[in-house]
Amino acid sequence: MIIQLDMQSELPIYTQLVNQIIEGIASGQLKPGEPLPSVRSLASDIGINLHTVNKAYTLLKQDGFILVHRQKGVVINPEGMPGITENYRNKMQGELKPIAAEAICRGMSRERLLLEVERIYQEITQTDKEND
Amino acid sequence: MIIQLDMQSELPIYTQLVNQIIEGIASGQLKPGEPLPSVRSLASDIGINLHTVNKAYTLLKQDGFILVHRQKGVVINPEGMPGITENYRNKMQGELKPIAAEAICRGMSRERLLLEVERIYQEITQTDKEND
DNA sequence: TATCTGTTATATTGTAAGTATAACAGTTAG
DNA sequence: CTAACTGTTATACTTACAATATAACAGATA
């Protein structure tokens, strides 16, 4: 699992970390039960502060994506991922709305927008099954 | 065109303004050529500073959604909306990717995600044609 | 006993958001 | 011409967040 940060991005580092770990889970690179690096080692690896990593882990923990075992350290939640809650649906809709609105403004058809979403969905889920 | 701000939101006020104006254009409530309130009057109406409104207008102007006529003031771009540029596609994809990734993590199927997007698209475009 | 883990506390720096006040240049109505 | 409006710019201030830097604590491990 390679973490790639953009220090020039307007997105906070901890947000980029959260996104990339979630994408890692979605793509199958990170599986339930799999351990994550400690806050200190990950921070050291990518050259940032441990508190920035800790903030990302805390957010992922709050949503149920990861667990903290007093023995095993930090792991992808072995019980599986959080489901589609009411809170989550509201959050997703609030994020999708401005994106859809701008697409409509720019003359993007319903079909083309759906194609874009479908393409991204597939891009994430298409596992490079080179090692099984 | 009613502006509704959430002062408790994590989104900056000027971002909420930008989003709502774009949604207003997408829904047909704001048509090309139509004037927008002055920075001072809009700021006064919703109880914020004129610089916050000005920042929103500046961003909308940079992307070509609005124009500043030395006579008519600020108007929705009469030449029409900006198209689907390379920059825009990259921006949209970068916004959609983390949303899709989280949806996949939570077990949302491709079809259900597309349905959500389709629903939001229709929700924005369905004009309440009460006055024509 | 060391060393690692996550966690917490505190302090500091830098930047962004938002407000406040003021001024300038151009336009428009009286 | 004057007065009131427009967008625009400049400056300064407060607040909040992002990120870093140290440091310490409690629990687990070798």
Image (spheres, coloured by chain):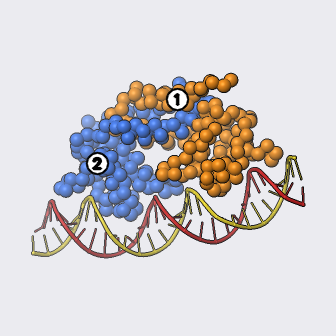
Chain colours: A orange, B blue, C red, D yellow
Residue at (48%, 51%) from the top-left corner? A8
Which amino acid, by three-letter code, is at mark 1? Answer: Glu
Label disc, if present, on residue A22 of the rendered structure: none
Residue B109 shows in this picture: no
Q: Closer to the camera, B39 or A45?
A: A45
Question: Is B47 left, or right, of A88 in this rendering?
Answer: left
Q: Marks 2 and 1: which is nearer the front?
A: 1
The residue to which callout 1 is attached is A123
Residue at (66%, 25%) from the top-left corner? A131
Image: A95 above or below A80: below
Residue at (54%, 52%) from the top-left corner? A12
- Mark 1 belongs to which subunit? A
Percent position of residue C26, x then y: 16, 62
Percent position of residue A25, x then y: 63, 35
The residue to which callout 2 is attached is B66
Image: A49 above or below B86: below
Badge 1: residue crowd in 10 Å (few <14, some 14–19, many ≥20): few
Percent position of residue B95, x then y: 48, 40
Badge 2: residue crowd in 10 Å (few <14, some 14–19, many ≥20): many
Q: Are marks 2 and 1 in contact (CB under 8 Å)?
A: no
Quadrant containing the C terminus of chain A in the rendered view: top right
Question: Is B53 left, or right, of B70 in this rendering?
Answer: right
Q: Closer to the camera, A98 or A37?
A: A37
Which amino acid, by three-letter code, is at mark 2? Answer: Ile
Question: Is A98 left, or right, of D6 in this rendering?
Answer: right
